[in-house]
Amino acid sequence: MPDAVPSIFYSDSEYHFFCMEMLENGFLNWKEQLLQRNYTSAYAEAAGRLLAAIHQRSVGDEEAARDFDTLENFRQLRIEPYLLACGSKHPELEPYFIEETERLSGVATCLVHGDFSPKNILVSSERLVVLDCEVAWYGDPLFDVAFLLNHFILKALHLSSDRKQIMYLADCIWDSYQKDAGDIIYSEFETQLVHLLKMLMLARVDGKSPVEYLHEQYRELVRVFIRKALPDGMDTEESQFTKQLTMSGR
């Protein structure tokens, strides 16, 4: 899928520079489109398919595993500022965050982008292009899926009057990902995904990289929800959060 990344036209290893494709003429940033209430489901479906392809095709790839043996980098850029920093602010929940960081650190399943979100995706009528791969790591595909879905849940809070349209895009992502991910989807995948997603929701409120657009009332809503939902498991996850999203939109 070479069209999913910018083309490299020339590189010089002696002087350490490269020339790459300039992406303009119809390309738009997906995050900006969402904030402008442009809810194109085709973009969501394409993003889910692309993420599934990255994960599924890199399973067992020894070259990718060697080139992206970057756990320490991932720890510094994701685990510490997101999960550990957030957990330290919520002592009653910190054991969950520590346990999850230990689990993530022990997984080496496939190539993971590490920052797969609308802000790093350019869209056009013909192509979807992924940018900013500096967090890439041969690790746990759950992180990419949870990281991406988290953006849509938080945007559903921010633009609560458009909650149904935004959550429909999350459904499109998840459905298209499942269809193409193959054996990536194991029996406990969804349970573990929801567990990590809860922590990332709170991390984007109280970690070192909070989302810039959430009003304090919605930040507090996330805190209240996660304090209850994380210890409770996922049995009533969907009904709880749907109810709170509905209330936030009134």
Image (spheres, grey):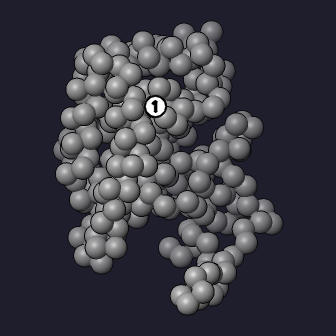
Q: Secondary structure at mark 1?
A: loop
Q: Which residue is drawn at the image coordinates 52% and 37% (left, top)?
A: 209
Q: Is residue 106 left or right of residue 171?
A: left
Image position of 208 with respect to 52: above or below:
above
Foreground residue, 16 or 241?
Answer: 16
Whole-percent x and y of residue 127? Answer: 64, 65
The residue that mark 1 highlights is 207
Q: Residues within 10 Å of mark 1 (few under 14, many from 20)?
A: many
Foreground residue, 101 or 234?
Answer: 101
Image position of 153 with respect to 2: above or below:
above
Q: Which residue is drawn at the image coordinates 65% and 58% (left, top)?
A: 122
Three-letter residue code for mark 1: Gly
Q: Which residue is drawn at the image coordinates 78% and 62% (left, top)?
A: 26
Whole-percent x and y of residue 49? Answer: 46, 58
Q: Is residue 144 visible?
A: no
Q: Which residue is drawn at the image coordinates 59% and 16% (left, top)?
A: 216
Residue most toward the front? 15
Q: Is residue 4 left or right of residue 87?
A: right
Whole-percent x and y of residue 73? Answer: 38, 56
Which image quarter: residue 17? bottom right
Whole-percent x and y of residue 109? Answer: 25, 60
Q: Quadrant of the C terminus?
A: top right
Q: Is residue 33 visible?
A: yes
Q: Is residue 69 left or right of residue 6?
A: left
Residue most toward the right? 25
Image position of 30 with respect to 112: above or below:
above
Count the marks: 1
